[in-house]
Each structure stands twice: as structure tokens, then as C-alpha cells.
Image (spheres, rainbow, N blue to C red):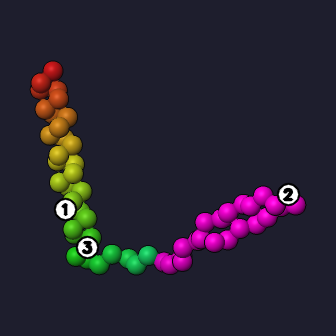
Amino acid sequence: MRYTSDDQGILNNYAAEPAVYFAEYPSPEEQQSYALRGAVAILIVALTIFTAFAAS
């Protein structure tokens, strides 16, 4: 664990930093999957809002 100490002996701990890496661009199959999931999510939200208005 990384730490520093001042003149009075008080410790100050630091978290270990994770390794940094670049994300990879999604493949066409992953892009289609994301688009389908987004469409399903929009449909669920729209149906929920429509149901709330219909019930009120």
C-alpha cells in the first residue's frame, strides 16, 4: 500500500491506481446489439409513461 507520513507520524494512505488502457471500438454485431437494446428500452419507457397517463 502506498502512503506518506508527516512530521508527527500521521499516515496518509493512497489507493492503488488501476492500469490504464484504450477501449476498442465495438464491432458491427455489437453495434446492432446496442441499437436493439436501445430500441427495447425506449419501448419499455414509452409503454410505462403511456400506462401512467392512461391510469390517471
Residue to which mark 3 is pinned: 30
Query: Is 22 situated left or right of 43 in this image?
Result: right
Measure the alpha-carbon separation of dots 3 and 1: 10 Å
* Residue 3 part of the magenta-drawn span: yes
Disc 3, SS: helix
Mark nearer the N terminus (2 vs 3)? 2
Disc 2, SS: loop
Few, some or many C-alpha atoms within 10 Å of disc 1 (few <14, some 14-19, many ≥20)? few
Mark nearer the N terminus (3 vs 1)? 3
Residue 36 appears at what percent x and percent y?
A: 19, 62
Say which residue appears at 54% left-offset and 73% top-offset.
Answer: 18
Residue 55 appears at what percent x and percent y?
A: 12, 24
Residue 51 appears at what percent x and percent y?
A: 13, 32
* Residue 6 part of the magenta-drawn span: yes
Measure the alpha-carbon separation of dots 2 and 1: 59 Å
The three-letter amino acid code for the residue at tag 3 is Glu
Residue range of the region highlighted in magenta in the rendering:
1-22
Residue 11 appears at what percent x and percent y?
A: 74, 61
- Magenta: predominant secondary structure element? loop
